[in-house]
Image: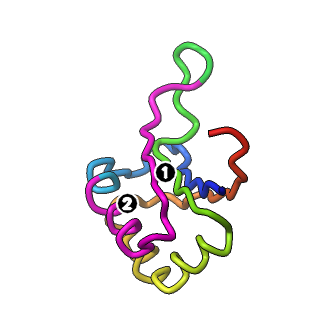
Amino acid sequence: MIKVSVMYPNTPGARFDHSYYRDKHMPLVAARMGSSCLRYSVDKGLAGGAPGTPATYVGMCHIYCESVESFQAGFGPHATEILGDIPNYTDLQPVLQISEVVVA
């Protein structure tokens, strides 16, 4: 199993609409990906590791798929629509990482 993490750096002055991301964008991603998306989670950054420090990322999601190929097959045909929705909730550039899930 793999996890695709999409992370939005916590940049001062940047815009990030958590409600839109949670209630509209991620359900759109899951609907378009269909069975390729086994499940997903959404995180809202609260704090950094040291007391009083800001979170590294203002928000992120994790999309779980059977394989990289499964993710690409589910996401690829809808990439234009999904990526085109980003300006509706943020002006940040996301950071993407694909990881193998070793322990769930």
Query: Which residue corresponds to mark 1?
Result: 61
Query: Label 2 is placed on what type of residue?
Result: Met
CA distance separating discs 2 and 1: 8 Å
| Left or right of 15 on screen, residue 64 | right
Residue furthest to the bottom: 77
Residue furthest to the top: 51
- The quarter of the displayed image where residue 28 is located: bottom left
* Quarter containing the N terminus: bottom right
Identify the residue at image location x=52%, y=16%: 52
Query: Label 1 is placed on what type of residue?
Result: Cys
Span of residues in magenta: 23-48
Q: Earlier in the sequence, mark 2 or mark 1?
A: 2
Which of the numbered marks, if any, corresponds to residue 2?
none
Tell me, yes or no, whether the highlighted magenta stretch contains residue 45: yes
User: Looking at the picture, does residue 35 appear above or below residue 12?
Assistant: below
Q: Nearer the viewer, residue 96 or 74?
A: 74
User: Looking at the picture, does residue 18 appear above or below residue 30?
Assistant: above
User: In the image, residue 47 lies at what x, y percent?
Assistant: 50, 25
User: In the image, residue 100 lies at what x, y percent?
Assistant: 72, 52
Which of the numbered marks, if any, corresponds to residue 26?
2
- Do the numbered discs 2 and 1 sit on residues whose CB atoms are within 8 Å? yes
User: In the image, residue 95 lies at what x, y percent?
Assistant: 61, 57
Q: Nearer the viewer, residue 21 or 74?
A: 74
User: Looking at the picture, does residue 28 appear above or below residue 90?
Assistant: below
